[in-house]
Amino acid sequence: MPCMKKLKIEPLAVEGFTQTQNNIALLRLQAELYEWEGTMYRGGYCEKTIAVDCVHFVASVLDKLCGTYYNHTKLPQDTAFHNKKEANEGFKQFIKMYPSYRIRGDVVQPGDVIVCGPIGVCGGPGHTMIVGRDALWHVGHKDVCKAGLAVMQKGAHAFKQIRRLKDRSKMLGNHFNG
């Protein structure tokens, strides 16, 4: 098994969107990602420019794009390492809040969510990243930052799956729809 899964980003192509609408949605996503850049890592936090963890970061970006707001239950930071069942339940809640489907392969689009976590019998989902225009964005050990397109397939943050929102038309924002 190769050590890294190398992802490729294709241009945003939301079904039913014109090229202009796709460009607007991409600009909204990029603006939100850059607003979070440099925000310090801290488990259980979710305050732009102050502190955030990976799940709250991705959820906040999706909330901004989709015009939603959810209060997320905080799980212990090491749940993915020791309690696969609880980690999977937390992930199911995330999918209920942000209905999505699984993407197979290695081609992603901006706004897709990358789910990672430890492998093994106890390993559950425990780290999320979101695809931007030309990079993955995540909360690293220090802060919110851009990352490369290669994702580990072993270790504590091994690739698990790619998720795409079912209704990406929300990415335009309410003032552009209609």
Image (cartoon, rainbow, N blue to C red):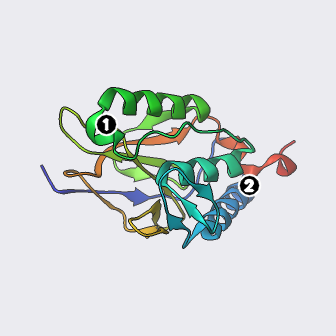
Q: Which residue is mark 2?
A: 21
Q: Which percent across, then down, holds residue 123? A: 25, 38
Q: Amino acid at mark 2?
A: Gln
Residue displayed at 87% across by 50% down: 175
Q: Is residue 9 left or right of residue 26?
A: left
Identify the mark at residue 124; answer none if there is no mark: 1
Q: Which percent across, then down, holds residue 16? A: 69, 42
* Disc 2 packing (10 Å; few <14; some 14–19; many ≥20): some
Q: Amino acid at mark 1?
A: Gly
Of 132 and 105, nearer the camera is: 132
Considering only order in the chain, which callout, 1 or 2, is on the residue closer to the N terminus?
A: 2
Of 76 and 99, nearer the camera is: 76
Q: Which percent across, then down, holds residue 130? A: 50, 54
Seen as rendered, the residue at the extreme bottom is: 38
Of 31 and 142, nearer the camera is: 142
* Disc 1 packing (10 Å; few <14; some 14–19; many ≥20): many
- The alpha-carbon separation of the residues under discs 2 and 1 comes to 36 Å
Of 14 and 25, nearer the camera is: 25
Q: Which percent across, then down, holds residue 89? A: 43, 27
- Position of the C terminus by quadrant: top right
> Residue 146, relative to residue 3: is it above or below?
below
Mark 2, secondary structure of its residue: helix
